[in-house]
Image (cartoon, helix red, strand yellow):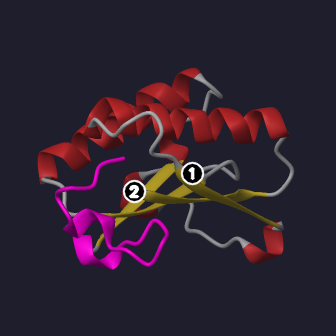
Amino acid sequence: MPLIHVHLMKGKSAKYVKAVCDGIHTALMTAWNIPHNDRFQLVSEYKKAHFHFDKTIWGVKRSNDVIVIYITSIARSAAMKKKLYRAFVKILGESPQVKKEDIFVTIVTVGREDWSFGNGIAQLTDSSLSP
């Protein structure tokens, strides 16, 4: 049920972008136990002139291959968020071999009533509904 926005520099192959998206979804299934069919991802690619980030803040040395993962989700514990960050580093490090320094994550929390998956219904507020 998380909504994922992936932001990266333009020029990566379709295979690379797919590996990033697949890795993000695998990490979410591993760390947050989301269902396999709960996948909502948007990918935005930017020209260098439109993608600005600090390469050294917080002691992290990023390259031009930085990936910004913006997650909108219901509330998760701090432990679950930290588990997800570690899963991203492990899984995306394996394929498509993203360096841990190039994985930037932010999570925005919203209420269950803030979601409608269609039909004009707030599905997460009705316990009789399931995916």
Q: Looking at the image, which residue is at 45% across and 65% down?
A: 117
- Residue at the spot x=13%, y=53% of the render? 77
Total marks placed: 2
- Is 112 magenta? The answer is yes
Instruction: Write the start and end of the magenta stretch as one range.
Output: 111-131
Position of 63 compared to 3: left or right?
Answer: right
Label drawn at residue 62? 1
Q: Residue at x 48, y 72 (%)?
A: 119
The residue carrying mark 2 is 2
The span from disc 2 to disc 1 (Cα, nearest Å) is 26 Å
In the image shown, does 131 or 83 lie closer to the viewer? 131
| Residue ranking furthest to the top | 94
Q: Secondary structure at mark 2?
A: loop
User: Mark 2 belongs to which amino acid?
Assistant: Pro
Q: Residue at x 28, y 74 (%)?
A: 110
Does the rendering let one see residue 65? yes
Quarter of the figure that contains the N terminus: bottom left
Where residue 7 sits, quadrant-wise, is: bottom right
Most frequent secondary structure within the magenta stretch: loop
Which of the pair 15/56 is nearer the observer?
15
Q: Nearer the viewer, residue 129 or 94?
A: 129
Q: Is residue 46 left or right of residue 35?
A: right
What percent of the width, then of the height, locates residue 10? 82, 57
Residue 1 falls left or right of residue 45: left
Which is nearer the eye, 125 or 66? 125
Give the class, few, some or many, for how many residues have Cα within 10 Å of label 2's Cα (few <14, many ≥20). many
Q: Report the amino acid beneath label 1.
A: Arg
